[in-house]
Amino acid sequence: MNLTVVRCFLFLLHISLVFNISASGLDLDSKKTDKQDSIAFKSPFYEDNERCFKCHGQNRYEYTNENLGRQVKALMFSERVIDRNKFYQSNHKNFSCTDCHSSEYVNFPHPGELRMDQMYNCLDCHGNDEKFAQFHFEEIDTDYQQSVHVKLEEEGFSCWKCHGPHDYKISIRNSSNLKETILYDNNICLRCHSNYDQFQLLSEKEEINILQKHDWLPNQESHFKNVRCIECHTQVNDTILVAHHIRAKEEAVKKCNECHSRNSLLMSSLYKFQSKEQRKDGFFNGIILNQSYVIGANRNEYLNVISLVVFCIVLLIIGIHIYFRLKSK
């Protein structure tokens, strides 16, 4: 399978996942867009932010060139285009742009040296703050510092390499649709691992062929759709909601029984945020059963007891039968 075919497959898989979610009512139809716009207007810094979105919220913008004395149209660099609706759904929707970016950006044209300003990371705002203690940012950073990603850049593999500051939203705690969470999280990984141009910003290694690297995985497509990459590629950490210790590929989970068993690894990762009250009807891993069927991980304690009782009754009948047969001789 050549590289072009692999890329096409990954693209079609991505489109298929998006289509499935859209069919479930998760697509951004016009009503939802209207709702997002109404949320935007409620933001305390909406007017201030619109000054930035006037240019950075679209691919093309206009400005007055005082030297030429006329309006000029220009194309916005793709990485500088910010989706307005995604921003107003993100964790930072109530922030002003200048809370994180220099106040000098209100001037146009922007001073060129501002591009060299160091970007904030999560701990700059959230570290050692009691208001955010429940999210365990310090523990996340400690976990992450052991990750293979830390070694990829001299300046460090910052939070923003995976969690875009303008669109990142917590999905796993707030979503009732597990498929949406899986797609959202896996797309974070695929942003680099299926995009060689993006990958080369961090590493000089050859492009990773996702399909060939996982050719040992049975029913590959089903696994990609129903579990997150981090289920197999992170070290489980019970103190934080989502593990951030990305392990080397040699340490990735490959044994089927680590997920397909009563003590399924999924209970410590993908399903750990679910309430224990969702374990129902006697199933050891009732949460898994509520969302999907994982072979080997959905044993039922009642059926176990019933099967044991039936087995004992059969042994008792056989014993009684043997007893009377011997007695009658």
Image (spheres, rainbow, N blue to C red):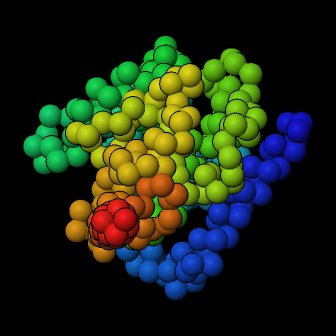
Residue 93 picture location, percent across and down: 36, 59
Q: Quadrant of residue 42?
A: bottom left
Residue that lies at the very extreme toward the front in this rendered image: 329
In percent of the image, x 68 and y 17: which residue is there? 204
Q: Position of residue 270 (x, y in %)?
A: 41, 52
Residue toward you, 220 or 114: 220
Extreme top residue here? 154
**Residue 213 x, y percent position in the rendering:** 70, 33
User: How many badges with numbers are in the image?
Assistant: 0
Q: Nearer the viewer, residue 251 or 117?
A: 251
In this rendered view, identify the residue nearer to me: 170 or 45: 170
Task: Name the residue located 63 percent from the left edge and 26 percent from the top edge.
Answer: 201
316 relative to 220 in the view: left or right: left
Residue at left offset 48%, top offset 22% = 148
Quarter of the picture containing the N terminus is top right
Q: Quadrant of residue 139?
A: top left
Q: For the view shown, which residue lies furthest in the bottom direction?
A: 31
Vertical relation: 70 (above or below) 163: below
Q: Residue at x 23, y 32 (%)?
A: 138
